[in-house]
Amino acid sequence: MFELWIRSIKSDMFTIQLESDEVKVSEVRRLVNEHLKLVDGDFYMTCQCRSLSDDEKTLAEYNIKNYARVDVMFRMRGGPGYNCPGCEKSRRIVAVHIQDSTGSRHEFQLENNDVTISCLREYIDSFLNSRHFRYRLVGNFGIMQNDRSLASYGIQNRAYIYINSATPESAYETMFVSPEPNPDTPTDQAIEGARRVIRRAYAEECQERSREREENERRLERIHRRENRRREREENQRRMEEYVEEMPDELIPPPKRSKDEDHEESQQRMEDYSEDEMPDELIPPPAKKSK
C-alpha cells in the first residue's frame, strides 16, 4: 500500500491510499477533489519543492516516495486577500529552475529566497538521486557556497541555476545569462571575458588533441612501413628458395666454405706437393747453423 500526506493551504492534513507509485497524478487529483468535496478544484500540487503539473506522469517519474507530503495550492481569482497569511505565503514562493549537464530543466518551489544552498542541495539530491555525485551549483556567474542563501547571490523568482561537475574547469562552462544582456554592465563584461577565456582554452585543447592525433598517425605509419619491409624480405627469401629448388645442379653455386676448411685444404695440398716434384731452383737452401 502506498500512502501520501496531503496538506491544503488551510493546513488541513489528510492521507490518501494508492496501489503503488505507478499511479498517475490525475488519479491523485481526483482523490483530492473527492476528499475536499470539489467538483473540479482549480489547484496545483507540489511535492519536494516541485510542481506536479503533468497529470499524465506517474508518481515514480516525479520520484515521490511512500509517506511523502504533497501540498495543495489553490489559484485565487480576483486577487488574493490583503490579510490572508496563506496568500501572503503563496506570493513569497520562489520558483527556481535547475538545469543539469544534459540540458534537462527541473523546477523547484521554495518558500523564499532566504533558503540556503545546502537546503537546495538536499532537494536536488532527493529528486535526482545524486547523493554520491559531486557537483557544483552555478548561478548569477558565481559558484554557490553551501552556507549562503539564494538572496546573497541575487537569485530571484524564475531564476536559473546550473549543475556542473566538480572539476575546476567545469565551473565556468555554464554561466547565468540575463534575458536582456547589456555589454556595458560589469557583470556582462565579466561574462564575456570568461567566455573568451573558455574559447581560448577550448581552442588550445583542440590543438593539443590534433597534435596528439597527428603524432599517433605518424607512429602508426612507421609501424606499418616496418611491417611491410619485413613482409617483403620474407617474401623475397621464399621466392629465392623456390627458385633454387627448380635450378639445375650445375648452376647451383657451391656452398660457402669456412676459413678453417680453406686452411686445411691448402695445408693438404702443400703436403701432397713433394720436394721431388719441385724444381731445384725452387728448393730453398738449408739453413746455416749458428755458432
Image (tube, helix red, strand yellow):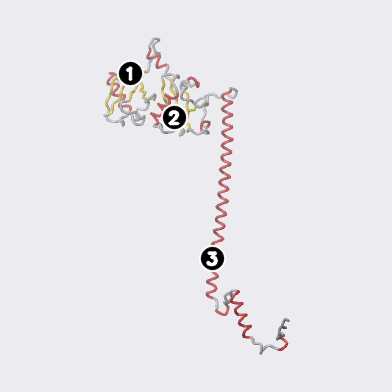
In the image shown, does 45 or 204 lie closer to the viewer? Answer: 204
Q: Which mark is residue 235?
A: 3
Determine whether label 1 and label 2 are within 8 Å by CB. Answer: no
Q: Residues within 10 Å of mark 2 (few under 14, many from 20)?
A: some
Q: Amino acid at mark 2?
A: Arg
Q: Residue at x 52, y 28 (%)?
A: 175
Q: Amino acid at mark 3?
A: Glu
Q: Which mark is residue 105?
A: 2
Determine whether label 1 and label 3 are within 8 Å by CB. Answer: no
How far separated are the C-alphas under marks 3 and 2? 64 Å
Label 3: which secondary element? helix
Q: Which residue is mark 1?
A: 8
How far separated are the C-alphas under marks 1 and 3? 88 Å
Q: Which mark is residue 167?
A: none
* Residue 275 to residue 101: above or below: below
* Residue 223 to residue 37: above or below: below
Which callout, 1 or 3, points to the residue nearer the camera?
Answer: 3
Which callout, 3 or 2, points to the residue nearer the camera?
Answer: 3
Earlier residue among tags 1 and 3 = 1
Residue 149 point in image, percent of width and height: 46, 21
